[in-house]
Amino acid sequence: MTRHEQILDCLMVHLERLSPKGGKLHADADLANELGLDSVNVMDLLLEVEDEFDISVPVNVIADIHTPRQLASAIEKIEAA
Amino acid sequence: MTELCITATPTFNHIAQRLADFETLPEALDYAAQGCTGYNFYDSRGNLMTPLFYVELRRRALAAARRLHGLGLKRGDRVAVIADTSPAFMEIFFGCQYGGFVPVPLPISMSIGGRERYLQRLRRLLKSCDARVAIAPESMVSFVRDASDGMALDYSGSIDDFHALDTPDVELTPSRPDEIAYLQYTSGSTGFPRGVVIRQHAVMANLFAIVNSGLAVRPMDRCVSWLPFYHDMGLVGFVLGPMASQISVDYIGPREFAMRPRLWLTLLSRHRGTISFAPPFGYNLCANRLRLGDSERLDLSAWRIAGVGAEPVHADVLERFAEHFAPAGFSPSAFLPSYGMAENSLAVSFAARQKGIQIDRVDRTCLEHHGRALQADRADAGINETVFVNCGTALPGHEIVIRDEQGRTLPQRVVGRITIRGPSLMSGYFMDEEQTRRALDDDGWLDTGDLGYLTEQGLFVTGRHKDLIIINGRNIWPQDIEQLAEQFFGVQRSDVSAFSAPEEAESDVVLLVQSRLKDNDERARLVKELTARIRSEFGVTCHVQLMPPRSLPRTSSGKISRSEACRQYIHARELAVDNACRVAAVSS
């Protein structure tokens, strides 16, 4: 399992728990449009991510992320930096 | 690795406190720089990253002023800066004060996947203020570069690049009392940004009234804030106010607060903060995220002013917060409701200190039908009453008058438009005479657009800015949502109406759309796409309802009346609920 896959798995667990009202959860689902994450959900998710991976996600990164897969890539990049 | 030991700026100051009795902001900073207090910036875990003593801020601001001169800026030119909660913002903001330039704080987007929308917004703001310079923190420089693409700015770049610029040895003439101190684009509609022009004398008049009358600031006060610097409450209340009274502030960013609301209280506890403000949703977020044992670990007993503003104040939210944090020594009498807006620099009125939330119970039927706020009959308390929170009396030198649509003064306990006058008012909206004329009359009265009534005790706000949608502290202009909807197939221009959903609804916003679409699949698709698009663009949940043609109520001028549409919607909803109950009763 690559690091990217590990991170993605972990994200999916958190997303499952946030139980967005929208569509089916998958790695390329649009977080806002399909999964229906609102601003409070997004903050919850980021909190989980920051605590779990012990990183801090800069605010500018958020604007470019649409899917769980993209978020996983961003986290991987921040970890590596 | 050696760890640098840095400590926060002290609460105790060795110079005599002067409570904002200065003519200009640079004059105020000159004085604050003689003391040992300043601003402190913390990271998302509550660790101190940077203390910025006022003396150091002044030194950096003077250098920034020279660099801006070096770029060839003329007096009064606008310098846009992304208002990140950081020392860099302070440096640029105060650099403009010393150089006679006009800083324009730009907002930060926190929505996921929101890059395009954010760029659009920045572009409009940069155009609206005719910025000559745009500066961002290193992490956000791409936004500023992309947004200003094609504009002939004198400079756009990161704060680090800015530091590399020359500091020519020019003589600086700080901003004078009658010059513009800053432009504030706080809560304007995205489509039609309005830059509030605040001059030095206006902001100083407001600061003087706030720190003397509103808060009665004293030497050992210390502020804590997570409010964004691109909002009046964050900028004027918690950047300029503390500096003008030479007291220290502890900051976390708004995003850090949204993620870890308890961090706010931790800072207050750790540094024995005495003054902090938040909109009601901030208090709500803390109460919601409370973990067992939290309040025992906190000491909030020093917190003497827990200000509340920027949103309609609901007493029950605050009561819940007070209950939760009573074990931490939080006193409900610390709550200080206030009323204000960027057009008046910041504050218009404060409730009385140490009295907590004072409420007025009024008869709901009478309020809805006659616009009169008569005190509810005690006998049937709670059944048919509405509760409003006292926002206090106008600051000294400021006036509040309630008027009807024709501008006539209304007596006490009659609901009307809140109009204000005084020395803190803006001089207008930047380069927008039409909007300025609409807001400010010849006698110097500002029509706030808010609704409320006065009693002997003070001002009660019954509805904020007509039609404005406020979600989690964010202001959303209904016309922005409507404009987006109008771009969809099957939706005609001005066939839509957006407004805040009634409190008990599942969504944040309601959008009514007149549509001629006949096909059921097409109708369902339109609703689904609109809902999704509004969620991604605005980050709010929206209930989209299709209506038959010509069913939305219109005003005499032919425009759709949002307030009437909202009333009809609520009425229809109540009928539906009633019917459902009746059906349930019959079938059981």
Image: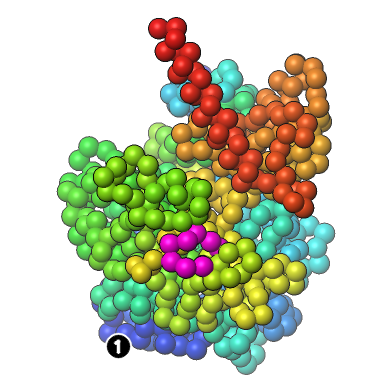
Q: Is residue B285 left or right of residue B380?
A: right
The dominant secondary structure in magenta is loop
Tell me what residue is drawn at x 30 percent, y 64 percent.
B305
Where is residue B181, by image quadrant? Answer: bottom right
Foreground pick, B295 / B150: B295
Q: Is residue B204 left or right of residue B153?
A: left
Where is residue A32, by image quadrant? Answer: top right
Where is residue B220, by image quadrant? Answer: bottom left
Residue B413 sits inside the magenta stretch: yes
Label 1: which residue?
B16
Residue B215 image position (x, y, % from top left): 33, 72
Residue B524 image position (x, y, % from top left): 71, 20
Judging from the image, mark 1 belongs to the subunit labelled B
**Quadrant showing the N terminus of chain B:** bottom left
Q: Is any atom of residue B272 visible in this view? A: no
Residue B343 image position (x, y, % from top left): 57, 69
Foreground pick, B211 / B112: B211
Foreground pick, A43 / B207: B207
Please state the extent of the stretch shown in magenta in the rendering.
B410-417
Tell me what residue is drawn at x 42 percent, y 70 percent.
B349
Q: Is residue B92 left or right of residue B433?
A: left
Residue A11 image position (x, y, % from top left): 49, 27
Above/below status of B64 relative to A6: below
The kind of secondary structure element at disc 1 is loop
Tell me what residue is drawn at x 45 percent, y 88 percent.
B22
